[in-house]
Image: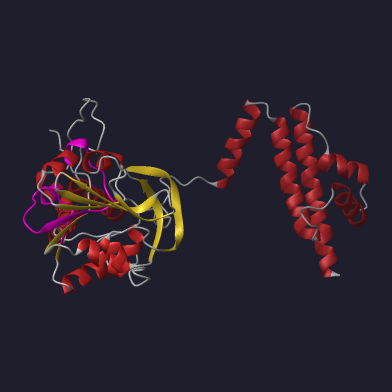
């Protein structure tokens, strides 16, 4: 009759229920957090971020002037245009060509592109190109007749600059390239802004930054503030599949949550080395039997050198202990000390304690006898010295 040694179903469930419960709680918490924050944007140049790189101050300023600001990271919100609404597209994320064409096909009358890339410029603002030069930080006058720039006056600008066609209005530049360009195209107004730092919480109060932002972004009753992420998995026109990743951000967040949960459970359930636990030996082996067994091994392997070294090491240990000689003492010093205390020949003592290995079994036995006599003599000499 055989006896099962594996876990039963009930034992397995009792062992796994707590780890599974902990994993479920962690994943559920992450999902709930994602649902609660799904309608809000975060990070640099976000209308909900109060950090220095955020733009919550600008969003509040616009709302104080009657402009409803709607922050989103969803592409569908960026293509659903309506009356008296403007669309701001932030510098984050990565959209495919088809995504930019969807935005272009929507009915937005006013687009504000903040540090757009090549595809965005080609689709939404043809004729405007990213210049190779960058503008150093500093206060600059408009240098154009754009009403929003003239009302704002001097503005703190820096960073990306653009080249523009003749019909465009170019402001805040170095005379050749500009950081703010407005172009009218097919009944649509497109503003290209190369320096979002001027509109952030850290710099909105400098110079005329707030006035410029309000005059550019506050021209409609509602502003959709779109921060692109990784929206589309469509293939490009050439069919190469280049473009954004196929995995949506939410899936990545859930995967990180699962990985963290697995890591926590592994730390909790992992085996840890505890203190050494003494265990009784199954058989008691006497010291004499161990010595005899080792001697047989030496004899069988003809290891007379090892046997002689063990005998000499044992004898020297007794000599060190009796006469208080340091264990690292030079052999000559040991022999001199023993010869002075025992009146034995130093040459003989050196040969016994530090000589070469025996050539045969008879020589090994002779060495063993000599060492035994020497240790007895040393013990008697040490005892008599102590008595005196």
User: How many callouts does the rendering have?
Assistant: 0
| Residue at the image position 56 percent from the left and 41 percent from the top | 289
Residue 205's place in the image compared with 1, above or below, is below
Residue 71's place in the image compared with 119, above or below, is below
Which percent across, then down, holds residue 164?
Answer: 33, 45
Q: Quadrant of the N terminus?
A: top left
Q: Nearer the viewer, residue 229 or 342?
A: 229
Residue 88 shown left or right of residue 140 in the figure: left
Q: Quadrant of the C terminus?
A: bottom right
| Residue at the image position 9 percent from the left and 47 percent from the top | 107
Residue 206 shown left or right of residue 86 in the figure: right
Q: Residue furthest bottom?
A: 64
Q: Nearer the viewer, residue 234 or 204?
A: 204
State yes or no: residue 97 in magenta.
Answer: yes
| Residue at the image position 37 percent from the left and 71 percent from the top | 206
Residue 229 shown left or right of residue 107 in the figure: right
Q: Is residue 369 visible?
A: yes
Residue 234 shown left or right of residue 302 in the figure: left
Q: Quadrant of residue 202?
A: bottom left
State yes or no: residue 108 in magenta.
Answer: no
Which percent across, then down, holds residue 274?
Answer: 39, 56
Q: Is residue 5 visible?
A: no
Q: Over which residues does the magenta segment extend? A: 70-99
Q: Residue furthest left?
A: 83
Q: Quadrant of residue 232?
A: top left
């Amino acid at each position: 009759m055989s006896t099962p040694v594996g876990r039963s179903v009930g034992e397995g469930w009792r062992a796994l229920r707590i780890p599974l419960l902990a994993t479920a709680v962690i994943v559920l918490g992450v999902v709930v957090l994602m649902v609660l924050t799904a309608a809000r944007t975060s990070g640099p140049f976000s209308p909900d971020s109060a950090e220095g790189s955020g733009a919550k101050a600008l969003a509040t300023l616009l709302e104080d002037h009657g402009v409803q600001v709607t922050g989103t990271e969803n592409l569908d919100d960026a293509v659903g245009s309506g009356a008296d609404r403007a669309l701001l597209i932030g510098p984050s994320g990565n959209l495919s060509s088809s995504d930019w064409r969807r935005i272009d096909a929507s009915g937005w009358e006013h687009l504000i592109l903040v540090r757009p890339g090549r595809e965005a410029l080609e689709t939404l603002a043809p004729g405007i190109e990213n210049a190779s030069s960058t503008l150093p930080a500093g206060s600059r006058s408009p240098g154009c007749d754009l009403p929003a720039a003239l009302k704002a006056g001097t503005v703190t600008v820096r960073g990306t600059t653009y080249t523009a066609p003749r019909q465009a209005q170019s402001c805040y530049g170095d005379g050749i390239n500009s950081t703010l360009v407005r172009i009218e195209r097919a009944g649509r107004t497109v503003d290209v802004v190369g320096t979002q730092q001027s509109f952030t919480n850290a710099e909105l109060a400098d110079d005329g930054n707030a006035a410029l932002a309000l005059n550019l972004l506050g021209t409609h009753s509602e502003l959709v503030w779109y921060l692109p992420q990784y929206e589309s998995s469509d293939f490009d026109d050439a069919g190469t599949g280049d473009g954004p990743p196929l995995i949506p951000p939410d899936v990545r967040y859930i995967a990180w949550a699962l990985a963290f949960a697995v890591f926590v459970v592994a730390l909790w359930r992992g085996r840890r080395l505890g203190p050494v636990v003494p265990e009784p030996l199954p058989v008691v082996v006497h010291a004499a039997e161990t010595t005899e067994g080792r001697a047989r091994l030496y004899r069988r392997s003809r290891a007379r050198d090892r046997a002689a070294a063990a005998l000499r090491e044992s004898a020297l240990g007794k000599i060190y202990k009796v006469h208080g000689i340091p264990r690292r003492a030079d052999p000559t010093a040991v022999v001199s000390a023993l010869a002075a205390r025992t009146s034995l020949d130093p040459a003989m003592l050196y040969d016994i304690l530090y000589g070469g290995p025996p050539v045969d079994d008879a020589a090994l036995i002779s060495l063993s006898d000599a060492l035994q006599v020497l240790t007895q003599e040393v013990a008697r000499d040490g005892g008599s010295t102590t008595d005196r």
